[in-house]
Image (cartoon, rainbow, N blue to C red):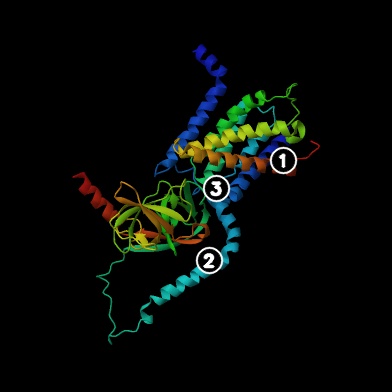
Amino acid sequence: MINEVIKNILRFIFLVFFQVLILNNIQLSGYLNPFLYVLFILMLPFETPKWLVLILAFVLGISIDMFSNTGGLHAAASVFMAFLREPILKLIAPRDGYDVVQKPTIQQFGFGWFFSYAGILVFIHHFFLFYLEVFHFANFFSTFFRVILSSFFTLTLIFISQFFFSNPKS
Amino acid sequence: MRNLILFLSRNYYIILFLSLESLSIFFLIQNNHFQRSHFLNSSNVIAGNIYETYSGITDYFGLKTTNKKLADENVMLRNSLRQTVSSEISSPITVNNNLYRQKYIYMVAKVVNNSTNRRKNYLTLNIGSKQGVKKEMGVIASDGIVGIVVDVSENFCSVMSVLHADNRVPVTIKRFGENSILVWNGNEDDEWHAKMKLIPSHLQLVKGDTVVTSSNSSIHPAGIMVGTIESFEKIAGNTFYNVTVKLSTDFNRLSYVNIVNNLMKDEQTTLEKTSQHD
């Protein structure tokens, strides 16, 4: 339990630094902005109380905002995504439900489950983020294009990180 | 009362969600004002120090270009010295200091954080209120205009870049002196280009016309390089051109910049305010 808490704190710190120092400097034609930091919310254990998920998402988003001068943009998107994590988990639950000891990883639930879990939530996060950033629906498709491309890029990074950084046996 | 507590405890999750969400959006809206909330930006102590350490590492990669830029600027400055001009008049001209009063003071600052890939881009510089930086001072680099100081802490300041959707820079075309405004829209423009508004279509524009800051601004000195005209087109049914400017500043490689302190700015703005009130 304590071990799990420390692991999550380290993951939080690593992801925030990776996001603000490396990923925020990536620029490909202004369309691709990967936001890998949402992986923290995705990887929280199932038994995390849902109010804690909201608060952690808020702290995560505010940390990113602090470094990138975006006010509460990332916080708003992260909290929204964290709010929908519970319903999405219920929606795509396997037939026999979730076990408390299990973690939402690709190793435990397989590619298909993880793809829909991460895919839906990342898309929701990016959609909310980019439309909140432009704050109007003019140029709807240009923004939508950014949402799709960036979600795709973030998802790719998430999958790469899954294969690199998780222990297959756990 | 009991019903209220019951209601709150039953719906605490939704209430928590809504309050966190509105708090975030409150911060976001605060952030859009020119005077932004002071503790949530990269000029605060934590973010500023981390960015400074990081840029201390990454600076080594850009040393070559920085050196070349400094050398170029040195040559330019040396060329403008009086000693390099041979005088036709035998007695040297003395400058009467009562006639030339100093209007601008420049300060050197190092860029510790910089972004170009968002719709609202900011820079963080390594000097702040201790070194005399104040809000609404201009920032320029050796190759052109950079932005405006919007927030100051003790040792850092954050700068609204020209590459910011809300930034409006008064500019002029050097050849005509026609006043205009430079805008940058992150959805359409990349980090090398911006648009110019209100250029009347009777002007005979040429590709490559120089665009400089205009004397209308109390923030930047007049005549600072902004860029060159890359393309222009007449809009059907409109008396204005649609002008695209190629920015001369290389925002991706900014390392040292100058902050401009206009010593007469307060005098100018107070005067303008009083005459507007009447």
Q: Amino acid at mark 3?
A: Ile
For residue B5, which numbered disc appears in the image? none
Q: CA distance from mark 3 to mark 2?
A: 27 Å
Residue position for label 2: B66
Q: CA distance from mark 2 to mark 1?
A: 39 Å
For residue A162, which numbered disc appears in the image? 1
Residue A78, given in percent of the width and then of the height, sits at 57, 35
> Which is more N-terminal, label 2 or label 3?
3
Q: CA distance from mark 1 to mark 3?
A: 30 Å
Task: Tell me which chain the residue with mark 2 is part of.
Answer: B
Which residue appears farthest toward the left when viewing the image? B278
User: Is disc 3 placed on a helix, strand or loop?
Assistant: helix
Graded by Cα atoms within 10 Å as few (under 14), some (14 to 19) or many (20 or more), the crowding at tag 1 reads: some
Q: Amino acid at mark 2?
A: Thr
Task: Tell me which chain the residue with mark 1 is part of.
Answer: A
Residue position for label 3: B46
Quadrant in which residue B173 is drawn: bottom left
Q: Amino acid at mark 1?
A: Gln
User: Is disc 1 placed on a helix, strand or loop?
Assistant: helix
User: Is disc 2 placed on a helix, strand or loop?
Assistant: helix
Foreground label between 2 and 1:
1
Which residue appears at 28% of the width and 79% of the height?
B94
Do the residues bearing badges 1 and 3 touch, measured as CB atoms within 8 Å? Answer: no
Quadrant in which residue B31 is drawn: top left
| Viewer can see residue B132 | no
Do the residues bearing badges 3 and 2 touch, measured as CB atoms within 8 Å? Answer: no
Q: Quadrant of the C terminus of chain A?
A: top right
Asked if residue A147 is positioned above or below residue B106 in the image, the reply reads: above
